[in-house]
Image (spheres, rainbow, N blue to C red):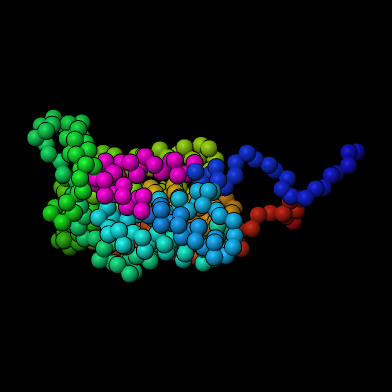
Amino acid sequence: MASLLVSNSPHIRSEEDIKAIMWTVVMMLVPAGLMGTVVFGWYAALLILVSIFTAVACEHLVNKIRKLPTTIGDGSAVLAGMLFAYVIPPNTSIFVTVLGSAATILLGKQLFGGLGCNIWNPALVGRAFVSAAYASVIFLSTWPRIRIDKTLGGDSGWLSERFAALQNSLAQIMGNINVDAVSQASPLSIVKGAAKALDANATTTVSELVKNNDISYMNLLTGHHVGCIGETSAGLLILGGLILIAMKIVDWRIPFFYIGTVALLSWIMPIGNVGWFHGDALFSVISGGLMIGAFFMATDFVTSPMTPLGKGIFAVGCGLLTVLIRNFGGFPEGVCYSILLMNTCVPLIDRFCTPRLFGVVKK
């Protein structure tokens, strides 16, 4: 019988490390940021760069103060700064962007001891911080509108409209978007407002409200609609998330159960004067910040549960809270606070979903 050799951990070695994982996630987020720049203009790109620079600078400063080796090369600060920029409006001031990005690193990460010690997703901490301090800036009732000159492409369908929008958006890159002249509500706000304005005895559905307000599902997928900088293109975020799942960087359970819960409950639960079982699952899934939250924030290694069962419970909780906030809360979007609230519950979830000890047989 061969001897059992016991050595010090780790027993499993991999070529992947924190640095490789972080930079891979950053690369998967780049297309959504580029789409935000094309749609909203160069000012959106400036906000992304300012946020990343601020996050990296704060990370380096804290390391210097604590007399620790610099960790800016691992990509975690770049990722946190990028994610924060992606979840703020494209007309946010430079000052608020710097303040929020600094809060992302200082309050969301370094306050707890740095990478691997934080209990909440750092980017969402930064978002919640500026939401509290500058609510009128972050929770906009109106957003910079994507101007589509249909005379450029006529009325020959979606492709011509997209070509006209692309021409208009590329022109905006050469100059700042006029954020004060033209604005409109976000798709979630439009539908929620329309649902509340209905007669109490109305029998319409959310799908009909979406159609009546000229909201295009294809525009929601491509990103040609109002919203935060990096969350508008659901299609690019889905693509990046699926690549991360295929690379086994992201566990499929969290985005699958999170998105599935939102889809199911959005169809079942009432909103405004639209009754039960009259929702629109597709609209609820591809609008707002669900995709960036499900694939890139809720899946954070540090702030999500360790076990498969725990991940499922965590994801379902995120989905439930998202729908409750969207349908019954004061804000049209609920992804940020749903993930933060479930991050708080992770230690409790891990406690009750502990993995079975190796070799132990239940009696």
Q: Quadrant of the C terminus?
A: bottom right
Left or right of 177, for residue 332 = right
Residue 61 coordinates in the image, percent (x, y): 49, 61
Left or right of 179, for residue 16 = right
Q: Quadrant of the N terminus?
A: top right
User: Is residue 300 or residue 176 the one in the foreground?
Assistant: 176
Q: Is residue 363 above or below residue 107?
A: above
Which contiguous range is marked in magenta? 24-50
User: Is residue 357 or residue 166 the one in the foreground?
Assistant: 166
What type of secondary structure mainly makes up the magenta span?
helix
Residue 312 coordinates in the image, percent (x, y): 51, 52
Left or right of 99, for residue 166 = left
User: Is residue 10 something that shows in the picture?
Assistant: yes
User: Is residue 140 or residue 101 the one in the foreground?
Assistant: 101
Which residue is rendered at x = 21% and y = 55% of the image? 143
Q: Is residue 295 above or below residue 152?
A: below
Is residue 107 located in the magenta-colored stretch of the structure?
no
Which residue is rendered at x = 54% and y = 60% of the image? 63
User: Is residue 274 or residue 309 the one in the foreground?
Assistant: 309
Is residue 39 located in the magenta-colored stretch of the structure?
yes
Residue 38 coordinates in the image, percent (x, y): 26, 41
Which residue is rendered at x = 11% and y = 33% of the image? 152
**What residue occupies the far bottom of the structure in this picture?**
133
User: Is residue 332 something that shows in the picture?
Assistant: no
Q: How many marks?
A: 0
Residue 275 coordinates in the image, percent (x, y): 25, 57
Which residue is rendered at x = 74% and y = 50% of the image? 9
Left or right of 156, for residue 1 = right
